[in-house]
Image: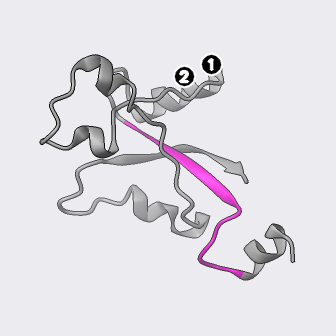
Amino acid sequence: MTIEEVLQRRTDLSTFIVHLTRDTEEGTARENLKSIVQEQTLRAGSPKGWATWERFELDDGALATQRVVCFTETPLEHVHALFADIDGRSINFAPYGLAFRR
């Protein structure tokens, strides 16, 4: 069986990976998407993971090595939930982004 066959049978898996944008200090989510398309570049933004745990006191140089670009494998029919207005959500994505075939 090929990966394509597996993905066609599994509704919990997507044939796409999605990168959503959000408002940042650099611009709105829409402006950020426009920049990505024009420059054909995704830039790693904020550090994520273990480097952001409060028990680590990392300098800016060390934190810079932990910046990431985030993608989701959420099936396309459910991506709307990632930018829905949900109480308590700490990161607010917008309905702007890119989808890439795997």
Q: Residue at x 52, y 68 (%)?
A: 78
Amino acid at pointer 2: Ser
Q: Position of residue 82 (x, y in %)?
A: 41, 59
- Residue extending farthest to the bottom is 9
**Residue occupied by mark 1:** 39
Measured in 3D between alpha carbons, the distance from the residue under mark 2 to the one under mark 1, in whole angstroms, is 6 Å
Q: Residue at x 67, y 57 (%)?
A: 16
Circle 1 SS class: helix
Q: Are marks 2 and 1 in contact (CB under 8 Å)?
A: yes
**Residue occupied by mark 2:** 35
> In the rendered image, which quarter contains the C terminus?
bottom right
> In the rendered image, which quarter contains the N terminus?
bottom right
Amino acid at pointer 1: Glu
Residue 94 in sight from this viewpoint: yes
Is residue 16 covered in magenta?
yes
Q: Position of residue 89 (x, y in %)?
A: 24, 57
Crowd rating for badge 2 (residues with CA inside 10 Å; few <14, some 14–19, many 20+): some
Q: Magenta span covers which residues?
A: 10-22
Q: Is 91 positioned to the left or the right of 28 in the image? A: left
- Residue extending farthest to the right is 1
Q: Is 56 positioned to the left or the right of 8 in the image? A: left
Q: Position of residue 50 (x, y in %)?
A: 29, 45
Is residue 18 covered in magenta?
yes
Circle 2 SS class: helix
